[in-house]
Image (cartoon, rainbow, N blue to C red):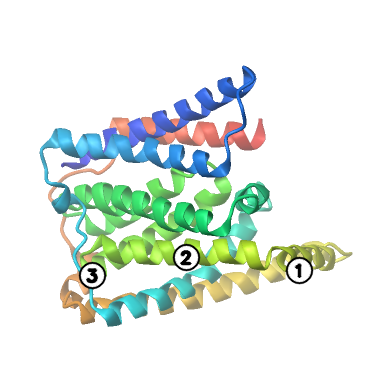
Amino acid sequence: MDYRRANRAYLYMILSTIGLVMVVSLWYLNGGFALNILLNNILSEMVVLIPALAAVLYSGDKLSVLIPFHKIKPSSIFLTLVYVLTLFPVVAFLNYVSMFFVENTVTAIADDVLDMPMWIMLLAISIFGPLVEEVVFRGVILQSYQRTGRILGSIVLSGLLFGMMHMNFNQFAYGTVMGIMLALLVEATGSVLTSFIAHAFFNGIEVVMMFTTGDVLDEAENTLEGYLGGMNGAMMKAAYAGYLFAAAIIFVIIAYLIARKIAKIEGRIEFFDGIKNCRDQGYKLVTLPLVAAMFICFGYMIYSAFV
């Protein structure tokens, strides 16, 4: 599948997601019963998966080509888990900065998540969600973009689209960086299995922490807000943001070195080191349907956050 069809598929994903929001809103306005977090999660993932798979089937390409899921070595799996842990500082920094402007989306749905059994949320948020999103973004979209020869551009743009697909500024901020770092893992191994393991592990940690340390984290957050909200609150918040930023930079560098080590283990070190020097084939990744999708997505996020 070429990049043009991938961009059209992304536009259909955005339109399907907004369409789902409108249908659910009309459902509520007409007295429909409340949809729980599990059903919401399944529907949200399906409106992303279906357009992507339809585009692949229509293109005539094999799913195994666009969604490479081959095995990786046990040592690479172990390093992938370590890699995930190094990403938490950058996520914490971007989440903290975004909350100066918008609410924390994960915190906003915490009560809905905690109303469900933990094992169900682990299956939905840590297995089903990551599987769908890795198949779509690190599989269909990233692999389609790479056919242009723009490897670095493919990594960055697929990460940006992944962040935008969350449809809110809070998750967009750290979702974009996570998308880029997950794509880097795929380049290190040539397998979407790696990014799925990483994504599932990251989400699993968040779900477990939500269920086991929710009250503790709430108290810590309130204490921190009280401490930072004093007379020198602005200065303290800036200092804390600076601390998080420094930690994020250090651990992102460590994450890159881990990804490089994984590439060496998987026999892809020459390709991995040559990513920045890959020559394109004269194609531009951005097309009119993609611009339309971005415009619609950002318009929706602005409306949701500030109107």
Q: Residue at x 35, y 79 (%)?
A: 79
Where is residue 138 shown, x and y percent of the image? 30, 54
Q: Nearer the viewer, residue 209 or 293?
A: 209
Residue 173, placed above or below residue 306:
below
Q: Which mark is residue 189?
A: 3
Mark 3: secondary structure:
helix
Q: Nearer the viewer, residue 194 or 253?
A: 194
Q: Which residue is mark 1?
A: 220
Mark 2: secondary structure:
helix
Residue 302, placed above or below residue 126:
above
Looking at the picture, which amino acid does disc 3 mark? Thr
Alpha carbon distance from label 2 to label 3: 19 Å
Q: Residue at x 38, y 38 (%)?
A: 46
Q: Which residue is mark 2?
A: 202
Residue 200, placed above or below residue 260:
above
The single residue placed furthest to the top in the displayed view is 30
